[in-house]
Image (cartoon, rainbow, N blue to C red):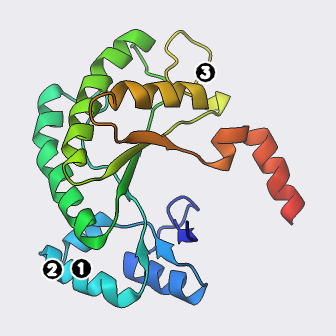
C-alpha cells in the first residue's frame, strides 16, 4: 500500500505532467494514470520511458470501454479495442487496476432491465482485462440526491456494488469495489468528519 494522488477525485483539472510534479513535491509515492496523456506519446515504450523518469508508482486508471445502458451493444464491442490499448499500456507501466462508476439510477429502465443490459457488457470487458492482469473496480454513488425517489434505482450501496462486481467477475475473477469515504459511510458522516479536520 502506498500514498497515491488522484487529482480528479479531488475535483482538480490538472495536466498529468504537472500532476506528477505535484505528487513528487508533496511526497506522494504514486499517481492515478491519465491514459489520454500517456497515449499521446505514440508508443508504449516512449510512454514508459517518460513515466519511469517521474519516479512515481502507477495508480489505477479510468476505464474507457463503452458499457452504459444508453450506449449501444455495437458501441461496446467497438470500444474493446480502446480497452485493450489502455490495458496494454497500463500493464507496461505496472498498473494493475482500472475503475468505473456505476450509475445509481436510470431515467427509464428499472433495476432488472438495467442489470440485464450492462452486466454482459462489463463481463466481456472484464474478461479482456484479465488477459493483461488488470483488475476492474466499481465505484458506487450513495448520495440520495443522485437518485430522486422513483422505481428506477440501480446500484447505490456497498452490498449492491459487491454483488454487482461478483456477478460480472464470476468467470474472470478480476472485479472488485472502489471505496471512497463519502459513499462508504454516507455524505453526512463524511462531511462532518471533514469539518472536524479544519
Horizontal arrangement in the rendering, residue 155 relative to residue 95 (left or right): right
Which residue is labeled 1 in the image?
48
Asked if one can make out residue 78 in the rendered structure from this viewpoint, the answer is: yes
Which residue is labeled 2 in the image?
45
Q: Secondary structure at mark 1?
A: helix
Categorize mark 3 by other alpha carbons within 10 Å: few (<14), some (14-19), many (20+). Answer: few
Residue at image point 40% right, 14% down: 108
Name the quadrant containing residue 147: top right
Q: Secondary structure at mark 3?
A: loop
In what quadrant of the picture does the N terminus appear?
bottom right
Compared with 22, 133 (above or below) is above
Q: Secondary structure at mark 2?
A: helix
In what quadrant of the picture does the C terminus appear?
bottom right
> Where is residue 29 shown, x and y percent of the image?
52, 78
Which residue is labeled 3 in the image?
148
Q: CA distance from mark 2 to mark 1?
A: 5 Å
Residue at image point 20% right, 50% down: 83
Residue at image point 24% right, 29% down: 121
Mark earlier in primary sequence (1, 3): 1
> Where is residue 153 shown, x and y percent of the image?
52, 18
Q: CA distance from mark 1 to mark 3?
A: 44 Å
- What number is the disc on residue 60? none
Contact between labelled residues 3 and 1, with CB atoms less than 8 Å apart: no
Mark earlier in primary sequence (2, 3): 2
> Where is residue 136 shown, x and y percent of the image?
36, 45
Compared with 65, 17 (above or below) is below
> Where is residue 63 shown, x and y percent of the image?
32, 49
Tell which tag, 1 or 3, sits nearer the viewer.
1
Residue at image point 46% right, 78% down: 19
Categorize mark 2 by other alpha carbons within 10 Å: few (<14), some (14-19), many (20+). Answer: few
Contact between labelled residues 1 and 2, with CB atoms less than 8 Å apart: yes
Amino acid at each position: 500500500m502506498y500514498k497515491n494522488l488522484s487529482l480528479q477525485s479531488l475535483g482538480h483539472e490538472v495536466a498529468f505532467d504537472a500532476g506528477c510534479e505535484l505528487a513528487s513535491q508533496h511526497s506522494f509515492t504514486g499517481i492515478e494514470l491519465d491514459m489520454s496523456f500517456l497515449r499521446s506519446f505514440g508508443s508504449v515504450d516512449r510512454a514508459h520511458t517518460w513515466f519511469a523518469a517521474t519516479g512515481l508508482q502507477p495508480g489505477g486508471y479510468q476505464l474507457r470501454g463503452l458499457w452504459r445502458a444508453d450506449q449501444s451493444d455495437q458501441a461496446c464491442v467497438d470500444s474493446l479495442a480502446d480497452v485493450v490499448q489502455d490495458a496494454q499500456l497500463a500493464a507496461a507501466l505496472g498498473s494493475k487496476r482500472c475503475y468505473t462508476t456505476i450509475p445509481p439510477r436510470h431515467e427509464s429502465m428499472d433495476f432488472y432491465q438495467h442489470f440485464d443490459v450492462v452486466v454482459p457488457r462489463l463481463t466481456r470487458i472484464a474478461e479482456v482485462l484479465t488477459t493483461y492482469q488488470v483488475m476492474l473496480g466499481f465505484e458506487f454513488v450513495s448520495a440520495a440526491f443522485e437518485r430522486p425517489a422513483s422505481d428506477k434505482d440501480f446500484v447505490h450501496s456497498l452490498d449492491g456494488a459487491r454483488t454487482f462486481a461478483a456477478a460480472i467477475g464470476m468467470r474472470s475473477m478480476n472485479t472488485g469495489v472502489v471505496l471512497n469515504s463519502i459513499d462508504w459511510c454516507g455524505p453526512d458522516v463524511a462531511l462532518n468528519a471533514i469539518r472536524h479536520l479544519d
